[in-house]
Image (spheres, rainbow, N blue to C red):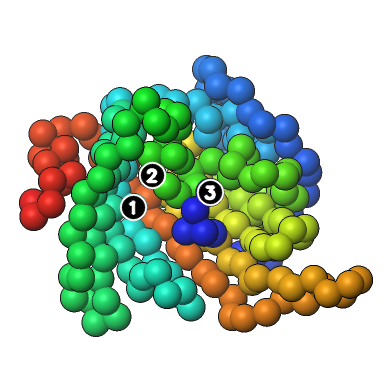
Amino acid sequence: MVLSRRVCAGLFVVAVWVAPPTTGTPLNLRADHLPTIPVIAHNLATALSGAQGTLILRVHKHGTNTPRYVTALEWVDLADGRQRRLDFDARGRLERDTARSYPWTKLPPLPSAACRCDLDPFTNFPKPPRISLVGPRTIDGHPTLRLRFVVTEGPLPSTTDMWIDRSTYLPVRGKVAFRATVVSGRHVRQVGPTITTTNDFTWLPRTRANLARLTPGR
């Protein structure tokens, strides 16, 4: 999972532990009710499975207090692992235009692996996080469901917020915040600034024009 990792009045928060979802046919939902977390997990896995080979993923990355980048733009072909990335400096000037490929002979054909970003937090944590459904929110005209995944143990406690499109169940936005920790005897303390990374996801049809975005200079 790439390090490349909030609640209004009237909304409720339900904290549960969820087992990894299984793929299959999306579950039917009533439009006037929020789905349960297991239903969201199931439908997210199903949507990501269907996206492979049919869609191109565009990722806009924003980093805060991290030396890796200020902002980056990526196009990812989930079918074959090809990726193109544009890195920009603090003034918005293009610094690098690079392309790479991750053949499936060396990398499992998982959307998160091809993207090198977290598309399914239900399955991508080494230990089960605490999961809560924060509530609905509209982002750029997309009604979404906001989920929160909290990890309190280990060297990098983190909070991951994920916004899922209520219609397609594909991720729209992911935000990760964490601080490193130092363990000294029985004492654990956090050090350094809070590192925050936000990924905005746009799912594009697999057209010739969109595939051309994977070529540097296009």
Left/right of residue 131 with respect to residue 118 in the rendered view: right
Q: Mark 3 or 1, which is nearer the eye?
A: 3
- Residue lying at 25% horizontally and 71% vertically, measured from the top left: 88
Label 2: which residue?
115
- Residue in front for this viewpoint, 40 or 8: 40
Question: Residue 75, how many percent across, how many down?
Answer: 26, 47
Frontmost residue, 152 versus 104? 104
Q: Is residue 41 left or right of residue 116?
A: right
**Residue type for callout 3:** Met
User: Which residue matches tag 1?
Assistant: 59
Tell me the amino acid under the disc marked 2: Cys
Amino acid, disc 1: Val
> How far is mark 2 from mark 3, CA to CA?
10 Å
Q: Is residue 43 left or right of residue 116?
A: right
- Determine crowd level at label 1: few under 14, some 14-19, many 20+ residues with C-alpha closer than 10 A: many
Q: Where, by quadrant of the figure, is residue 73 drawn?
A: bottom left
Helix or strand or loop: what does disc 2 sit on?
A: helix
Q: Quadrant of residue 210?
A: top left
Residue occupying image coordinates x 27% and y 76%: 89
Residue 143 visible in the shown view: no
